[in-house]
């Protein structure tokens, strides 16, 4: 069902690096699909959302997912999970994945979640004018830190040399988000807890400094030249221990931040709020999940497949 391609990358500060491109082709008969989507995951994450792939392939769209360096299928034994010096470190594997996909496809949409939703518009801004991508779908993108103002200001004070160390920050551990997702706890989804542990990954000073630089760049304004759909929950909730309300809110990011900063992406942005959505909206309870896919279809038909006689 899925094909997997390892993409070797140049070594980084920890040594050898790879990314992994996963593909599921649409059943379109004798004529291959000329449309594709590329999925980018978030932090403490990898691609496992089979129902998202199924949604696209049922509509005649070839589905690709990229496990970024140091995540999921791409994690090597010597690497620190998720650790990069800059979000631009991911650009080479996105470039290569897009090159591979565009060999056989005329139309490409990037669908990105959380940290992937921060990386994707920065990449798209970099390649604007080249026609490589026809739309962006951002699922709860990581546009700002969901912390009190003093902690946000402290994060912005990360300077050299601290910002370039691999030091893990003493932020504590919460398993609440994982509990809302995994079927062994309070959720309905099954995935590899080694690749996506309930307690998440450690947050390192180097990574946090890289995220804040990327967020400041986005806050200053991008010029993404393709239509963008931003999806966020209507509900935000900060909790340290599990409560039933955690199953119907974004407990990772503040949806108000997402809505606010979506205006900085470019001239053509649609922002949709999903009642009772989780942080990863496609993993929400069925009513919210159905709305996510309905809004996705509506937007894709209006802006990506517009004028295409083969639109689903």
Image (cartoon, rainbow, N blue to C red):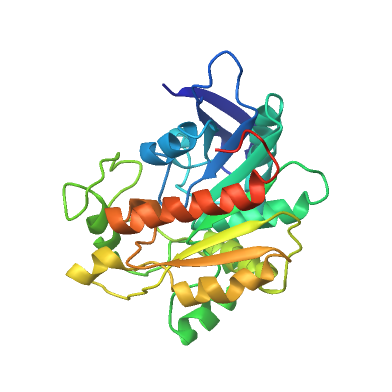
Q: What is the residue that sits farthest to the front in this orientation? A: 309
Q: In which quadrant is the C terminus drawn?
A: top right
Left or right of 220 on screen, residue 301:
left
- Residue 150, compared with residue 304, is above or below; it is below
Question: Between 303 and 247, which is closer to the camera in this rendering?
Answer: 303
Judge whether 144 appears above or below 198 on screen: below
Residue 170, how many percent across, how many down? Answer: 37, 69
Q: Is residue 174 visible?
A: no
Where residue 143 sits in the image (x, y, percent)? 55, 68
Q: Residue at x 42, y 55 (%)?
A: 292
> On the picture, is 252 further left or further right than 204?
left
The residue at the far bottom in this view is 150
Q: In the image, is 9 to the left or to the right of 258?
A: right
Across and down, in percent, residue 7 comes to: 60, 28
Between 297 and 221, which is closer to the camera in this rendering? 297
Q: Residue furthest right?
A: 129
Comparing 160 with 255, the one in front is 255
The answer to whether any part of residue 283 appears in the image is yes
Q: Residue at x 48, y 85 (%)?
A: 149
**What's the residue at 69%, 68% (across, down)?**
217
């Amino acid at each position: 069902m899925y094909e997997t391609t390892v993409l070797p990358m140049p070594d980084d500060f920890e040594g050898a690096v790879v990314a992994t491109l996963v593909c599921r082709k649409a059943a379109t008969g004798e004529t291959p699909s000329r449309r594709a989507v590329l999925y980018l995951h978030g932090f403490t994450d990898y691609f496992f959302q089979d129902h998202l792939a199924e949604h696209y392939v049922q509509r005649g769209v070839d589905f690709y997912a990229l496990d970024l360096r140091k995540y999921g299928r791409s994690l090597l034994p010597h690497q620190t999970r998720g650790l990069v010096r800059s979000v631009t470190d991911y650009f080479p594997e996105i470039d290569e994945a897009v090159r591979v996909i565009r060999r056989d496809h005329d139309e490409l949409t990037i669908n990105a979640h959380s940290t992937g939703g921060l990386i994707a518009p920065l990449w798209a801004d970099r390649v604007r004018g080249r026609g490589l991508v026809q739309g962006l779908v951002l699922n709860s993108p990581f546009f700002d830190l969901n912390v009190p103002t003093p902690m946000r200001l402290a994060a912005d004070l990360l300077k050299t040399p601290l910002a370039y160390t691999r030091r893990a920050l003493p932020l504590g551990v919460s398993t609440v988000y994982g509990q809302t997702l995994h079927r062994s706890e309070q959720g309905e989804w099954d995935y590899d807890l080694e690749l996506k542990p309930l307690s998440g990954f450690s947050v390192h000073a180097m990574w946090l400094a890289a995220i804040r630089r990327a967020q400041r760049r986005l806050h200053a304004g991008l010029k993404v030249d393709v239509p963008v759909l931003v999806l966020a929950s209507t509900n935000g909730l900060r909790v340290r221990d599990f409560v039933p309300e955690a199953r119907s809110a974004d407990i990772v990011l503040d949806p108000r931040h997402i809505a606010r900063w979506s205006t900085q992406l470019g001239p053509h942005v649609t922002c949709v709020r999903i009642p009772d959505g989780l942080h990863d909206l496609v993993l929400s309870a069925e009513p919210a999940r159905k709305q996510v896919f309905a809004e996705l279809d509506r937007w894709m038909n209006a802006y990506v497949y517009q004028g295409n006689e083969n639109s689903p």
